[in-house]
Amino acid sequence: MQEFLPDINVEIDACYLSNPLATDLFWKFFDSDVQKDDQLFRRLVEAYPAQNATIAERLAPAIGVDSSRILMANGATEAIQAILHNYARHLHVIVPTFSPYYEFATPDHQVTTFRSHKEDGFALDPAEYVDSVNKSGADAAILITPNNPDGYMIPRDDLTWILDRLSHLRTIVVDESFLHFGMDSVAGELPSLVSITDAFPNVSIVKSMSKDFGIAGIRAGYAIMSPERVKDLLAHGYLWNINGMAEYFFSLLARPDFIPAYLPVLSEYRDAVTRFTDTTSRANYLTAYPTSANFQLMELPPGLPADLVTTLMLFRYGIYVRNCDDKVGLDGEFIRVAIRTESENVKIVAALEDVISSV
């Protein structure tokens, strides 16, 4: 007998992590540029983009780093893979975390883990972590701040303390892909941790553009590392990896009018994030963990499966949230909810309450 499933209409994608207000801003700039130059989009499609190093030169002033230290990447995952496959053999990973950091490990890699705990709000104890890394014998450590899926951001003093005591490692990756949502802008500059690479040459900063700027489809990211490593990677396959639309975005980011337009949009969105988390923190039908990112990890009541909640959210309300059953290091039933626009957030909270209270 043939089974038929009802059509699924995703009205709110609360799984994909991005700032939707920044997507609107990008489109405003792009639409204006196309109106001024009706051949712009054709050139982006028809012509070859610039090489990696040329795009890095355009980006460098916007992030305050010499272009020789920037590896442009086709999304942050390409940068992650490049670093792990070339400058690490034994990875020490905090769990739960973004799974590619251990999924990209090859058969030649060894992977060990340090576990954060929900009872501590997934906070990282610096001394325990450093001790764990040293005992593991790893040559590479991964630090995501804020971390995905729990949203915990390592305090700057703790991060510096950790890096100082792990300066003997071959490689430390600090992933700041969600940092704009947890770190304030200073003097009109983009929030960033890139300055730590001056003091710690074994640190590579990884940055995705998808989350902050809402442009996942463009596949744009970068890594900051030593000039020697950038030169080495460019000589082995990363010379020409950025597409035309990503090149356009990085050129846009470097324009003097873009960051001043972006920062108020970021502030407005962060206010929406705060209102969402203030609401969920008062909910008595689930446990919503504190977050410094634009998503929130939520633990469901005992006995309520995450797959049931995510299915009902989708079929009843057209709201897609992330089932975290596959996240290594999570004990219990968890979902992760991406924080969206004000009107969407109201619908998400109402749907969660209805679904959980009805089963």
Image (cartoon, rainbow, N blue to C red):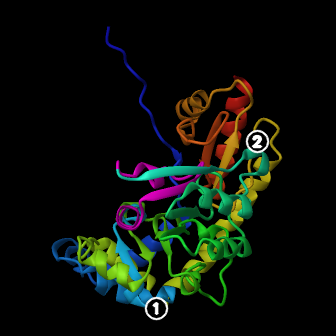
Whether residue 34 sits left or right of residue 307 in the image: it is left
Picture quadrant of residue 94: bottom right
Label drawn at residue 220? none
Asked whether the residues under the numbered discs 2 and 1 touch, taking CB atoms below 8 Å apart as contact, a structural biologist would say no
Picture quadrant of residue 249: bottom left
**x and y, in percent, of residue 269 in the image:** 64, 66
Instruction: Identify the residue position indicated by label 1 in the image.
Output: 61
Per the image, label 1 sits on a secondary structure element best described as helix
Picture quadrant of residue 3: top left
Q: CA gap, disc 2 to disc 1?
A: 42 Å
**x and y, in percent, of residue 293 in the image:** 64, 61
Whether residue 149 sits left or right of residue 83 in the image: it is right
Q: Residue at x 24, y 76 (%)?
A: 239
Indicate yes or no whether the magenta region holds residue 238.
no
Which residue type carries mark 2? Thr
Residue situated in front as seen by the camera: 173 or 338: 173
Indicate yes or no whether the magenta region holds residue 85.
yes
Instruction: Identify the residue position indicated by label 2 in the image.
Output: 287
Per the image, label 2 sits on a secondary structure element best described as strand
Which residue type carries mark 1? Pro
Q: Which residues are magenta?
A: 81-107
**x and y, in percent, of residue 169 in the image:** 52, 70
Residue 319 visible somewhere in the drawing:
yes
Callout 2 crowding tier (Cα within 10 Å): few <14, some 14–19, many ≥20: some
Q: Residue at x 78, y 45 (%)?
A: 119
Whether residue 17 sits left or right of residue 77 in the image: it is right
Residue 19 visible somewhere in the drawing:
no
